[in-house]
Amino acid sequence: MAGQIVIVTGGGRGIGRAVCRRFAAEGDRVVAAARSPEELEETRRIIAAEGGQCVTQPTDVSSPDDIDALIETTLRRERRIDVLVNNAGAAPQSEIEDLDENLFRAILSVNVDAVYRGCRSVWPVMVRQGGGVIVNLSSVASVDPFAGFTAYGAAKAWVNAWTRGLADEGKRVGIRVFAVAPGAVETKMLRDPFPDFPREQALDPADVADMVFTLAQPACRHMTGQTVFVKK
């Protein structure tokens, strides 16, 4: 299904950049969104060098106005939105003694509120055009949280439940909703807290991107609502 319009949050690096490259490689037009204009420009440059199409929009997913602007701007420019990948995430390491309310709210803002807002903003667009696909990035921490990432794991468990419920709502309007829950992935998010994590045990971001891309294809139309775990 080449020629789709695909929005990817957190598209400036890591899994998000890999997802942008994967869709662009198949002939889709990608809108990469992230906070850093420099990282977004690097994503755009890489995709252009590979022969793909990518436009960028600096976006802070913790801002509801930024998310609404991302959807509205894309719709004005492209006339439709076929796929939304809610990839942006934050996983600061903090055990309960240090998890003050500001940090807790920040974790929820990026991992929960932004997913809600992205889905809520794009939903009427997809309803009007007769369908679409939403893929939310979760984590194995959603079912196997560990010390220091309790809030993150709980937020991702919400993503799994949200995905399943929203998929049921989407069936009557042609919108499919999935979650992809990776294990350790070779990204900055992994290396910052775990610099010594064995490289052979980490997924390549392209492994996750492959699954995101696959779920967006018609062959997976009867799998809506599932959280797919990807890990070594």
Image (cartoon, rainbow, N blue to C red):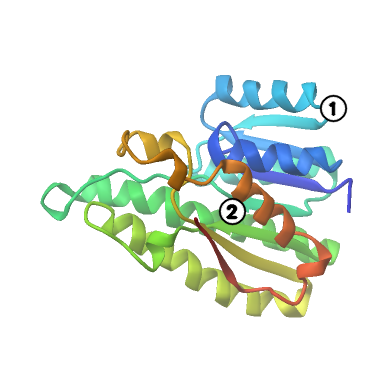
Circle 1 packing at 10 Å, graded few (<14), some (14-19), many (20+), is few
Secondary structure of residue under mark 2: helix
- The residue nearer to you, when weighing 53 against 120, is 53
Amino acid tagged 1: Gly
Vertical side of 20 occupied by 86: above or below:
below
Vertical side of 221 occupied by 141: above or below:
above
The answer to whether 116 appears left or right of 96 in the picture is right
Residue in the image at 83% along x and 41% along y: 78
Q: Label 2 near label 1: C-beta < 8 Å?
A: no
Vertical side of 50 occupied by 96: above or below:
below
**Badge 1 is on which residue?**
51
x, y percent for residue 198: 38, 41
x, y percent for residue 52: 82, 31
Residue in the image at 43% along x and 33% along y: 188
Q: Residue furthest left?
A: 97
Label of residue 118 in the image? 2
Residue in the image at 62% along x and 36% along y: 17
x, y percent for residue 25: 80, 38
- The residue nearer to you, when weighing 202 against 90, is 202
- The residue nearer to you, when weighing 60 against 164, is 164
x, y percent for residue 142: 40, 64
Q: Quadrant of residue 224?
A: bottom right
Q: Quadrant of residue 218?
A: bottom right
The answer to whether 97 appears left or right of 47 in the picture is left
Of the 4 image quadrants, the one containing the N terminus is bottom right
Q: Quadrant of residue 222?
A: bottom right
Circle 2 packing at 10 Å, graded few (<14), some (14-19), many (20+), is many
